[in-house]
Image (tube, rainbow, N blue to C red):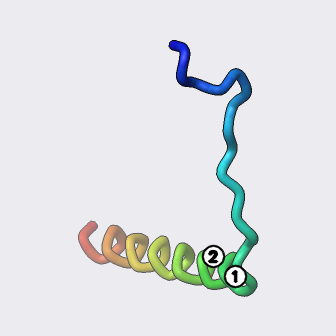
Amino acid sequence: MSGEPSDKMELRHDPVPGYRPFFFIILAAGVIYLALIFYYTL
């Protein structure tokens, strides 16, 4: 295709400070919530 550049283009962004700990806290809360649901339904 004639209109495409020969190199791959990559979208970059600066990381947001504080996002990673917030993500892991929410992920852990979700895992604990699901574990409690599975525990009480057995």
In the picture, measured across the screen, residue 31 lies left or right of residue 14, that is: left
Q: Quadrant of the C terminus?
A: bottom left
Q: In the depicted view, which residue is nearer to us: 3 or 16?
A: 3
**Other-residue count near label 1 (Cα within 10 Å), few / some / many at <14 / 14–19 / ≥20:** few
Residue extending furthest toward the front: 2
The type of residue carrying mark 1 is Pro
The type of residue carrying mark 2 is Phe
Q: Are marks 2 and 1 in contact (CB under 8 Å)?
A: yes
Q: Residue at the spot x=51%, y=13% of the render?
A: 1
Q: Residue at the spot x=48%, y=71% of the render?
A: 31
Q: In the depicted view, which residue is nearer to us: 8 or 23?
A: 8
**Other-residue count near label 2 (Cα within 10 Å), few / some / many at <14 / 14–19 / ≥20:** few
The answer to whether 6 is drawn above or below residue 41 in the figure is: above
Element carrying mark 2 = helix
Q: Say which quarter of the image contains residue 3.
A: top right
The answer to whether 2 is drawn above or below residue 34 in the figure is: above
In the picture, measured across the screen, residue 7 lies left or right of residue 36, that is: right
Q: Residue at the spot x=65%, y=26% of the render?
A: 5
Q: Position of residue 33 (x, y in %)?
A: 40, 79
Q: Position of residue 41 (x, y in %)?
A: 24, 71
In the picture, measured across the screen, residue 37 lies left or right of residue 2, that is: left
Q: Residue at the spot x=45%, y=75% of the render?
A: 30
Residue at numbered disc 2: 24
- The image's mark for residue 37 is none
Q: Position of residue 36 (x, y in %)?
A: 38, 78
Element carrying mark 1 = helix
In the picture, measured across the screen, residue 39 lies left or right of residue 9, that is: left
Q: Say which quarter of the image contains residue 40.
A: bottom left
Residue extending furthest toward the left: 41
- The image's mark for residue 21 is 1
Q: In the depicted view, which residue is nearer to us: 14 or 24?
A: 14
